[in-house]
Amino acid sequence: MAEHGLRARITWSKMGISSAFCLTYDPNIKPAIILYTMSIEIFQELLEANESGSPRVVATVAETTGSTPRSAGATMLIRPDGSMVGTIGGGCGEAEVWQGAMDTMQDGKPRTIVVDLTEPTEGDDKICGGVMHVFVEQAFSNPSEA
């Protein structure tokens, strides 16, 4: 069985805002693959989860069309208790993604959630008018369960 590891490159801006490029290390995959860009808070949470073995789900805006609250690459981490780190835009769109993330937490299956912000729902003004495709995946999985 191949051993997997986690490497990262962390960058800081003049404002102190940071991001981390998370790379997977698998000797069978050359070169290492950039998984996603994320805030330092999400990156630190993933490191802690990796050490403890506690599951986490990451939701990443993969594609946007029209006006959306966040652009492609925005990430949100969801803990087993349902609490979140980061945001993909808030509101009912984020609630749809949160529900999908909780489903992924239960079944371990990645999914893509299409958040349509073009049609207002009852009692809600979806003022953005765009569409987001959000990829939801379990950050760590137990190889024995695969």
Image (spheres, rainbow, N blue to C red):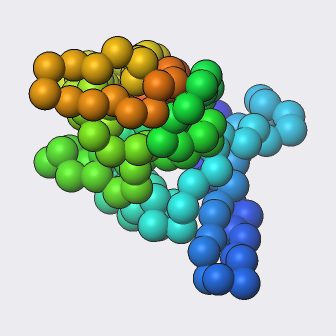
Please tell me which residue lies in front, 30 or 2. 30
Where does residue 87 sit, x and y in percent of width and height?
A: 40, 50
Q: Which residue of the protein is positioned furthest toward the right in this rendering?
A: 31
For residue 11, above or below residue 66:
below
Q: Residue at x 61, y 22 (%)?
A: 65
Q: Is residue 37 above or below residue 134?
A: below
* Image location (x, y in percent) of residue 110: 43, 20
Q: Is residue 68 left or right of residue 15?
A: left
Say if residue 143 shows up in the picture.
no
- Depicted 59 relative to depicted 110: above or below: below
Q: Quadrant of residue 34?
A: top right
User: Quarter holding the N terminus?
Assistant: top right
76 or 120: nearer the viewer = 120
For residue 69, say whether it is visible: yes
Which percent across, then down, holds residue 46?
44, 56
Q: Residue at x 77, y 29 (%)?
A: 28
Residue 56 in which image quadrant? top left
Give the left or right position of residue 65, taking residue 88 as reference. right
